[in-house]
Amino acid sequence: MDMNSNIEYKEIKTFGRDELERLFLSVEWSSGRYPERLVQAMQRYETVLSAWDGERLVGMLCAMDDGVMTAYIHYLLVAPEYQHCGIGRRLVEIAKERYADYLKIVLIAYTHGTGFYENCGFHAAHDSVAMYLTEMGD
């Protein structure tokens, strides 16, 4: 299914709590339980790319950067019924274009998602491990 032809990509930082909650919970991410915080967080990212099917938010990529050397993709999510349609790949392509002059783009991938990122040109680090401290209970 090629839904990607109907998708509009935007670079905005203002979202409604309900649309963020719906998208994040659709992929079972615990941050979706904090929609007010997500609304605030979107304002603070350097880069927020979103994918829209009409008025519906169906995908998002959020990145932080230091302005010259390293960009960190923090969120990349696509609503389940829109996955495997090229939306995530297009969001990554836009981010790679934006950060083309940087020395590196970094992200943390879930194990089941590494193939997708490798297909987008990323390589797994074999000498490091992702670590985090969370208050969200997972």
Image (tube, rainbow, N blue to C red):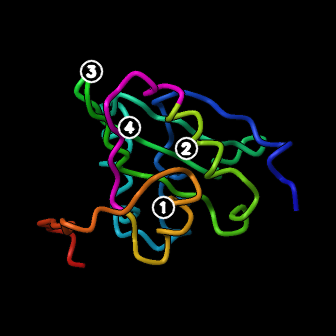
Q: Is residue 112 above or below residue 44?
A: below
In the rendered structure, the answer to whether residue 44 lies left or right of residue 15 reads: left
In the rendered structure, the answer to whether residue 103 lies left or right of residue 95 reads: left
Give the residue number, with chain letter if any, for mark 4. Answer: 42
User: Real-space Cα distance between discs 3 and 1?
Assistant: 27 Å
Which is more N-terminal, label 3 or label 4? 4
- The boundaries of the magenta stretch are 97-108
Which is more N-terminal, label 2 or label 1? 1
Q: Which amino acid lies under the numbered mark 4 shown in the image of this protein?
A: Met
Q: Are marks 3 and 2 in contact (CB under 8 Å)?
A: no
In the rendered image, residue 36, in percent from the top left (x then y), is placed at: 34, 49
Determine which of the numbered discs, if any, sits on residue 67 in the image.
Answer: 3
- In the image, 67 versus 26, the foreground residue is 67
Q: Quadrant of the N terminus?
A: bottom right
Q: Which amino acid lies under the numbered mark 2 shown in the image of this protein?
A: Val
User: Real-space Cα distance between discs 4 and 2?
Assistant: 17 Å
Q: Residue at x 65, y 69 (%)?
A: 80
In the rendered image, residue 126, in percent from the top left (x then y), is placed at: 26, 68
Q: Secondary structure at mark 2?
A: helix
Give the residue number, with chain letter if any, for mark 2. Answer: 92
Q: Residue at x 48, y 61 (%)?
A: 24
In the rendered structure, the answer to whether residue 23 lies left or right of residue 137 reads: right
User: Real-space Cα distance between discs 1 and 2?
Assistant: 18 Å
Give the residue number, with chain letter if any, for mark 1. Answer: 24
